[in-house]
Image (cartoon, grey):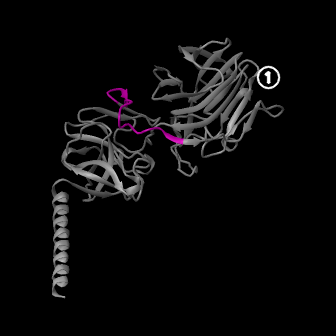
Amino acid sequence: MDRPRRRGRGWLKFALGVAAALGVAALVCRATIGWVYPIGSGSMEPALMTGEAVFLRYGSKVKERFDIVAFKDLGGGASIKRVFGLPGEPFMINLSGDIRFNRKYIPEAPGRPEPTPIFDSQLQGMDEHWRHGGTAFDPWTREPADEAGGSEVWTLDGSVVKFGSDLGLMRFHDRVTNGHLTPSGKYVRGPSPVHDVIVEFDVKVLSTGGSLRVLLSEQNDLFELNVSMYEVESEYRALVQRIVPSRFSDTTPGGLNMVRGGLGMERAAIPIGEWVRMRFSNIDNRISFQIGETKFQTDYRANTPRRNQVKGVQVPFSAGERVKFGGFGLAAQFRNVRVLRDFHVVPRGRFGVGTAITLGADEFFVLGDNSENSRDSRERGPISLERLIGTAQAVVLPLDDFRRL
């Protein structure tokens, strides 16, 4: 009987020793390497959600723009934000909510916040968010979701649609704001309008004899991707045009006269009777499209202003149906439609908003991804190198949501 007791006491001592060693290791880790930092607010959504926790590696070295860092607040607490402005840079947030540094937009580089979905036909019904057809006739018909696509399929009979008619376009009627789409398919609308928008979908062309069309609007500009498909061949002409009013007025009849300007043309391979992914975007004055493996992009200097009087201040304004797609003269099917908006900064605060601020040799400009609900360098000013605690490496809790940052 004494031997089992001694054995049990031995296992207990061993377990206590392991626990003590782990505790010491945790204390050493917390003191010298890093620790788990809980996310207590929604200022970094959707990158970091409230209730998650990240592993924070100590050290003041910021390796790249877009690193997520923790820093000491002046009140003694700590905050976690994303680095946008680096030491020595002229940095500015314009009234459209776009970031400029060294007179350039933020680059498309690893770590840049991804576009945020605001509509997804795999989670939402098209009829609830899009208009199509007219009062007398509708060339669009809906089919149930197929097993391969995972969303409802819409068929356009463009043979009855006249050249360039909007009757053959599916038109997005939701406002594009700084909201987001939840995993369950609920759209959480934001209070601030966003100008930069993206649309993507699968298309299957069933017959030629016309054109596919995709249109995006921003302020007083309309950007159209027109893919002419009049011959049975492997590649078709994809033309991007910018359409602006002849006079920049929203009230005079002259504002209805439109002027077209070509931005570029490519040849795109669209096999008849097969699904092809298409994407058309307007991000930071860069127009891009992708059709299958074909890619094209071109930059333009500035948007044609369309201004709205808000509280006595003139601000850039985008309104109306911001996204349209469809065609005329051909038959086609569409599925897996998504609309996304670009990262947007609410132009609020006194540091770097509307007027450039030049960062010091040891200063960083930090912002929350959810800038509507974030207090950051816009109000608090740049943060110094000595206030940095460390960089976030990964989301570690809950365990099911583990992901590297």
The reply to whether residue 31 is visible in this rendering is yes
8, 340: nearer the viewer: 8
Write the start and end of the magenta stretch as one range. Answer: 101-117
Q: Main secondary structure of the magenta part?
A: loop
Res 247 visible: no
Residue 285: where, in percent of width, then height?
A: 47, 26
The mark tally for this picture is 1
276 and 121: which is toward the camera: 276
Residue at the (19%, 64%) spot, across then down: 22
Task: Indicate whether 89 appears above or below 238.
Answer: below
Q: Is residue 109 magenta?
A: yes
Side of 73 relative to 370 (left or right): left
The three-letter code of the residue at mark 1 reads Val
Q: Secondary structure at mark 1?
A: helix
Judge whether 38 appears above or below 312 on screen: below
Q: Quadrant of the C terminus?
A: top left
Position of the N terminus, as image quadrant, is bottom left
Report if residue 28 lies within the magenta region. Answer: no
In the image: residue 267, left or right of residue 356: right
Measured from the top left, where is residue 9 in percent x and y? 17, 80
> On the image, which quarter does residue 207 sit in?
top right
Q: Is residue 199 left or right of residue 25?
A: right
The quarter of the picture where residue 333 lies is top right
Residue placed furthest toward the bottom: 1
From the viewer's side, name the closer residue of 192 and 292: 292
Nearer to us in this view, 11 or 105:
11
Q: Position of residue 69 (x, y in %)?
A: 28, 47
Circle 1 packing at 10 Å, graded few (<14), some (14-19), many (20+), is some
- In the image, residue 52 lies at what x, y percent? 38, 57
The residue sitting at 73% across, 19% down in the picture is 329
Q: Which residue is mark 1?
A: 160
- In the rendered structure, the answer to whether residue 274 lies left or right of residue 7 reads right
